[in-house]
Image (spheres, rainbow, N blue to C red):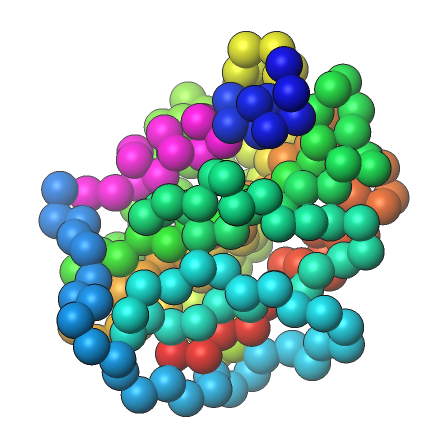
Amino acid sequence: MSTRSRLAAAVLPLLVLTACSAGDDAENPDATGPTEVTAAAGCADVDGELIAADTRAGEPTLEVPLPEGWEDDSTMNSELIRLALINPDLVRDDFAPNIVVTAEPSPADEQAAVDRQVQGIQQATGSADVDREDGEVCGFTSFIADYELPEAGAVPARPARVQVIVVPHGDQTITYTLTAQATAPADPAYAEAVEEIFSGVQIAA
């Protein structure tokens, strides 16, 4: 199985998690025209290259640092998946570490959107305990959580770390998730890249 095929298989649990967190009232954003975009306060200073996630008309923009050795795999992009980064140099167990960015518009308010993401992790892992650290990204409500992803075909079970950011957008919210996964998460190069990307998120809404 190719690296990209393994990535596709490994991303499936992330989509299931997102589906668990999405309520029946989730809907697509109105993409009929642009809205005024202003830089959000409180974004971290970043040196080096940034890469932008796909956006739909009128949505906020989201960029993340692109560490050395990491590359964009746009074959995974969809209405839900807006960016997928992999590092072929860090392959372990025939699996490339990756970070997947998703965007989920919803009429839910900020707290309801956060609660849904926590519930999605609980349902996907079968555990009521979520190791979660609350915070803010660019002034927006955020949390980071660690959990275990199940085996997916030839890809072994592995830990994942997700950063959830809820951005108010008109009369709805957009929930962004950045999910990092690797079969060798203790690799310093991987851990440093995840920290660089998570801490360097840039959002203009």
Q: Nearer the viewer, residue 67 or 45?
A: 67
* Snapshot quadrant of residue 118: top left
The residue under the point 69% across, 49% down is: 71
User: On screen, 190 above or below 32?
Assistant: above
Q: Is residue 198 left or right of residue 177?
A: right
Report the span colored magenta: 11-23
Q: Nearer the viewer, residue 106 or 117?
A: 106
The location of residue 34, given as percent across then percent down, is 26, 80
Residue 204 covered by magenta stretch: no
The location of residue 16, given as percent across then percent down, is 36, 29
Q: Nearer the viewer, residue 158 or 37?
A: 37
The residue under the point 74% across, 41% down is: 87
The location of residue 63, given as percent across then percent down, is 55, 67
Residue 20 covered by magenta stretch: yes
The residue under the point 83% across, 37% down is: 89
Q: Is residue 62 left or right of residue 174?
A: right
User: On screen, 80 above or below 17?
Assistant: below
The location of residue 72, given as percent across then percent down, is 62, 49
Q: Is residue 133 left or right of residue 69?
A: left
Q: Is residue 129 left or right of residue 46?
A: left
Residue most extreme to the top: 153
User: On screen, 60 above or below 35?
Assistant: above
User: On screen, 72 above or below 167?
Assistant: above
The residue under the point 29% across, 70% down is: 57
For the C terminus, which image quadrant? bottom left
Res. 158 in view? no
Residue most extreme to the right: 188
For the N terminus, which image quadrant? top right
